[in-house]
Image (spheres, rainbow, N blue to C red):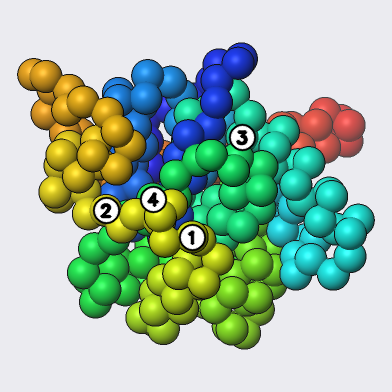
Amino acid sequence: MGQEASKPQPGTKLQVIGAGLPRTGTASFSKALEIILQGPVYHGGTQNCKGSSLNLKTWISVLEHTPIRSPDDEKFVLSRISALTDDYVAITSAPGFCFVPELMRLYPDAKVICTVRNTEAWDKSVDAIATASLQWHLKVILFPLSPMRYFPRYLEALAAGRWAELYHTSGKPTKHVGTQVWDRHIQHLREVVPPEKLVFFDVRDGWEPLCKALGCEVPKGIEFPQINERAGMESFAREQVKRGLIRWVIIVGTIVTAIAIWRF
C-alpha cells in the first residue's frame, strides 16, 4: 500500500496497466512509475483505503456487474472504470489486475506490466493478509469509518464477481488463495494480452528492465523505490481498528448519555 492517495492530473494519459497481483511489490512499482512517467498513479489499495469513499463504492458497483453478461453490463463497467482511472499515468494493484481486457479497451496504447515474485512466497504473504482482512468482527469495527466501512462489502463483491470468474474459486472470500490463482492469472494474461504489449517485471531487478520496457531513461541519482508494503498494510490495519473502536466508544457513550438525560 502506498503512502497517500494520488490526485488525478487533468489531461494525463494512462501509459501502464499494472497487471500484477497484490503482494508483488505493487507499492514500489507504483512509486517508480510516478518517477519515470512524472504523473499520478492509481494504486488500487491506496486509493480505496485512503482516498474518497467514491473509489470503493464505484468498484463495488463495477464488480457487481461481473461476470459481464450483456452489452449494458459492459458499457457500465467501462464507463465506471474510465471515471476512476482517467487522468492517471498508470493503474496498479487490486482490483485493476482483474480488469486488464477492459483497461486495454479504454487505453489501447498502454503497456501491460505484471509484477512478479517467487510463487510460494507470494502465496504465504497473501494468505497472511487475507486471514487478517477476513475476520468477521471487522465489519462491525469498521462500520463507523469512511471509506473503510465499504471494504468488507468490496471484498465480498470481488470474490463473488471477477475473482471467481477468472480463478474458478468458490465465489466467497477465503483465507487461503493458493498458487493455482497465480498460475491462472499468468495464463489469463498470456491469453488476453498481445505478446508485444505484455511485460513481466520483478521489482528486485530495479530500474533498467522497467525503463527499457517503457522506453525511458534510467533516473540519475535516484534509487529504485523499496516500500515495505506488508508493514504499511499492517500498520494501517491497526490504526483503523483503533479508530473504529474509539468511534464505537463515542457512539455508545453518546447513546447512553442521551438515554440517561431522557429518563431524568
Of callouts 4 and 2, which one flags the residue occurring earlier in the amino acid sequence? 4
The residue that mark 2 highlights is: 201
Q: Between tags 4 and 3, which lies in front? A: 4
Residue drawn at 80 percent across, 60 percent down: 65
- Distance between the Cα atoms at labels 3 and 2? 22 Å
Mark earlier in primary sequence (4, 1):
4
Mark 4 vs 3, N-terminal side: 3
Choose the circle earlier in sequence order: 1 or 2. 1
Residue at image position (58%, 83%) is 169
Which residue, given by chain and number where applicable, does mark 3 sit on? 85
Residue that label 1 marks:
194
Asked if marks 1 and 3 touch (Cβ < 8 Å), the reply is: no
Residues at marks 1 and 2, CA–CA distance in whole angstroms: 16 Å
Label 4 and label 1: CA atoms lie apart by 12 Å
Q: Which residue was labeled with disc 4? A: 113
Asked whether residue 135 is in view, the answer is no
Q: Residues within 10 Å of mark 1 (few under 14, many from 20)?
A: few
Q: Which part of the image, by quadrant, shows the C terminus?
A: top right
* Element assignment for label 4: strand
Which circle's residue, 1 or 3, is located before the other in the chain? 3
- Determine whether label 4 and label 2 are within 8 Å by CB: yes
